[in-house]
Image (cartoon, grey):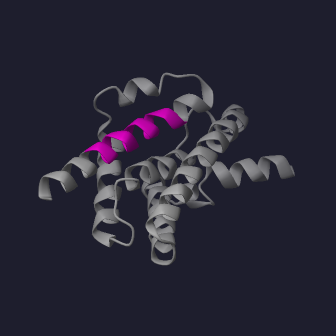
Amino acid sequence: MKQKNLFHIIIASGFGTGFSPFAPGTAGAALAAIIWIALSLFVSPLPLLLITIALIIIFTALGVWSSNVLEPSWGKDPSRIVVDEMVGVWITLLAADAGNIYHALIAFALFRLFDIWKPLGIRKMESLKGGWGVMMDDVLAGVYGFIILLGGKWLIG
């Protein structure tokens, strides 16, 4: 296996979680949530927000690139590619309070609900070409989760 392909496999598979025999998308999203929770225990809110935004931007770009590289051999949007789930859950976590495990769990659940259900144009995003189609449905699912979590926090006060 070429070094270049190994890099793309590591990124696309969410550091290997995409090879989980059970629910690889959930495994990738769970890893992203665990990373965020760990960071939130050691980083104050503003740096956590900036780190999360950086993770979203970096892994979206890497996800598009890696998906494009792997699509010829792995096929269109295979379940092994879970970097999109990682990005999606990080987007929803932008609405969570730092260090609040309940917010993190709700963010995770909301993202997975939208990712699996695919309402309101999420499924349409899959029709985009190549890596963009792989990534953008989960980006939109993350945005919807973000809106619901933020709205829920506002309603509860």
Q: Is residue 1 visible?
A: no
Identify which residue is drawn at 48% across, 22% down.
127
Identify which residue is drawn at 48% across, 58% down.
49
Q: In which image quadrant can residue 101 be found?
A: bottom left
Identify which residue is drawn at 35% across, 57% down.
108
Q: Which residues are magenta?
A: 135-147
In the rendered view, tell whether residue 78 sits above or below residue 86: above
In the rendered view, tell whether residue 104 sits above or below residue 10: below
Residue 140 covered by magenta stretch? yes
The percent position of residue 57, horizontal first and vertical second, equals 59, 44
Near-viewer residue (154 or 106):
154
Near-viewer residue (121 or 3):
121
Near-viewer residue (125 or 1):
125
Q: Main secondary structure of the magenta part?
A: helix
The percent position of residue 87, horizontal first and vertical second, equals 50, 48
In the rendered view, tell whether residue 6 sits above or below residue 76: below
Q: Which image quadrant: the C terminus?
A: bottom left
Identify which residue is drawn at 44% across, 40% down.
138
Q: In which image quadrant can residue 114 be found?
A: top left
Q: Which residue lies most toward the right here? A: 2
Near-viewer residue (13 or 145):
145
Q: Is residue 3 visible?
A: yes
In the rendered view, tell whether residue 73 sits above or below residue 59: above
Residue 54 covered by magenta stretch? no
Q: Which residue lies most toward the left here? A: 156
Q: Which residue lies most toward the bottom here? A: 42
